[in-house]
Image (tube, helix red, strand yellow):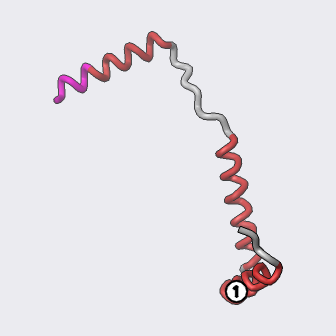
Amino acid sequence: MHFGVWELLLILAVVLIIFGPGRLPGLGSGIGNALRNFRKAVNQPDAIDITPKDEAQAAAREHEEVRTKRG
C-alpha cells in the first residue's frame, strides 16, 4: 500500500482538525514511545529456564501427584 503526497496531507489535515495543534506533539510522542517499547520487546530474547533438569522433573512429578489427588 503506497500513500502519495496528497493522501498524506489529507490524513494530516484530518488529524489536525480532530486533535488540534496543541495535542499533536504529545500524540506523536506517545506513539513513538509505544513503537520503541514494542520493538524492544520483540527484539529481546525469550526468558531462559535455568532450573536444573533433575529439580524440574521432580517439581513436575510433585505437581502431577497433587493434581491427581485432587481430581
Examine the structure image and report whether residue 52 is included in the region drawn in magenta.
no
- The majority secondary structure of the magenta stretch comes to helix
Q: Residue at x 25, y 23 (%)?
A: 66
Q: Position of residue 6 (x, y in %)?
A: 80, 83
Check the image and report above or below for 15 versus 71.
Answer: below
User: What's the amino acid at mark 1?
Assistant: Val
Specify whether 50 is left or right of 21. Answer: left
Q: Say how many tags the image has.
A: 1
Range covered by the magenta-colored residues: 65-71
Name the image quarter holding residue 28. Answer: bottom right
Q: Is residue 18 left or right of residue 54?
A: right
Q: Quadrant of the C terminus?
A: top left
Q: Nearer the viewer, residue 20 or 7?
A: 7
Horizontal side of residue 21 vs 52, given as left or right: right
Q: Quadrant of residue 2?
A: bottom right
Instruction: State the image coordinates of residue 62 (x, y, percent, origin top left).
Output: 31, 18
Is 30 located above or below residue 69 in the figure?
below
Residue 15 placement: quadrant: bottom right
Q: Residue at x 65, y 35 (%)?
A: 45
Question: Residue 5: x and y, percent?
Answer: 83, 79
Residue sticking out furthest to the front: 1
Q: Name the residue tied to disc 1.
A: 14
Q: Nearer the viewer, residue 48 or 3?
A: 3
Placement of the N terminus among the 4 image quadrants: bottom right
| Percent x, y of residue 42 | 65, 45
**Along the line of sight, the residue nearer the viewer: 54 or 9:** 9
Secondary structure under the numbered disc 1 in the rendered image: helix
